[in-house]
Amino acid sequence: MLNPIHLRTLQECVRTGSFAEAGRVLGYTSSAVSQQMVLLERAVGAPLFERSARSARSTALASRLALRSRDALGALDALEREIRAMVAGDEGSLRLASFATANARLLPEVLATVVAQRPNAEVQLDEAEPDEVLDPVLDGVVDAAVVFEYDLDPRQWPLELCAEELLAEPLRIALPRQHRLAGASEVDLRDLTGDPWICTRADTAGARSLVRLAAEAGFVPRIIFRSNDYSVIRTLVARGLGVAVLPGLALPDERVRIARIAGRRPHRRVKTLHRKQNTNPLLPIALDCLAESCASVADDWDDPR
């Protein structure tokens, strides 16, 4: 295989017509240039110079090789620049996945910041539930995923992944504005025993968490409407069709009243998952932006009103 260093030296030898001058331009000794040309001749399998005691004249083959190698070395230079840019995170791609409420509240700021800092990088975002993103992250198709788990429905994440908690979302009670308890800052779940409930689908962590919360309060919730879209749930609550438990990222909404759960501080915990071996230079930038975005939205939850 031809050595690109030797080819660059050959180009200078052909251009200058002198080993000594080529060495001066490239920072080599005349002897080092001569040794490189000997090695290149061995690789080519033919002489490239007509040597005498005073000079080394390029052969037609040397001139042809120097000319044809320009494009190849130019492409190699471009590849090296591209690789350096990718290593530095100036180029390349970043693939993220996250669930709906995080996409609405957390990811827009993150994506905007990453794109602003690395305008030549390709940033992609997919929407998926936690169970749907595990295989893509494990397989390296996705660089990082934003997932959640409930205190009352804990999960075990694959050991091959690094799981870092970003945010602990408080769970709040959402009440219609005309509800009898709408003026309370805290609501005892036992006072909602007879109310109709609105919840996510039965196979979700949110639904299991509600059932377990209610069980601790001594009742089974009468769930009459289900949707995995929290904007739908808030709208149904606002229309007076029931009450709901919402995580922090699904708040606020001026159409409904929000109250703490008396005697309990349950949370939904937002985490990032990524492979421990992931060396994408864009990943730390995104994780830092996620941490900042989470810190800013957490300030909204100090006052449930």
Image: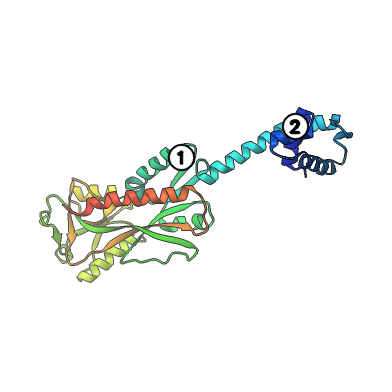
Q: Percent from the top left, x then y, of residue 216?
A: 23, 71
Residue under the point 46% across and 55% down: 133
Name the image quarter holding the N terminus. top right
Residue 38 seen anywhere in this rendered image of the structure: yes
Judged from the image, the secondary structure of the residue bearing numbered disc 2 is helix
Above or below, comparing residue 182 to residue 15 in the picture: below
Q: Quadrant of residue 46?
A: top right
What separation in Å lies between label 2 and label 1 (alpha carbons)?
42 Å
| The disc label shown at residue 96, or none | none
Amino acid residing under circle 2: Glu
x and y, in percent, of residue 85 in the image: 54, 41
Q: Residue at x 77, y 32 (%)?
A: 13
Seen in the image, is 232 located left or right of residue 183?
right
Give the mark toward the camera: 2 or 1: 2
- Where is residue 199? Give x, y as percent: 28, 57
Residue drawn at point x = 52 percent, y = 41 percent: 91
Between residues 61 and 183, which one lies in front from this camera angle?
61
> Would residue 272 be found to the left or right of residue 87 on screen?
left
Residue type, numbered disc 1: Arg
Judging by the rendered image, the residue that carries numbered circle 2 is 21
State the image coordinates of residue 294 (x, y, percent, origin top left): 32, 51
Q: Secondary structure at mark 1?
A: loop
Taking depth in this image into account, of 160 and 67 the one nearest to the observer is: 67
In the image, taking residue 104 as reference, residue 188 lies left or right, namely left
For the residues bearing labels 2 and 1, Cβ distance under 8 angstroms? no
Residue under label 1: 118
Instruction: Residue lying at the far front in this picture: please name it.
Output: 54
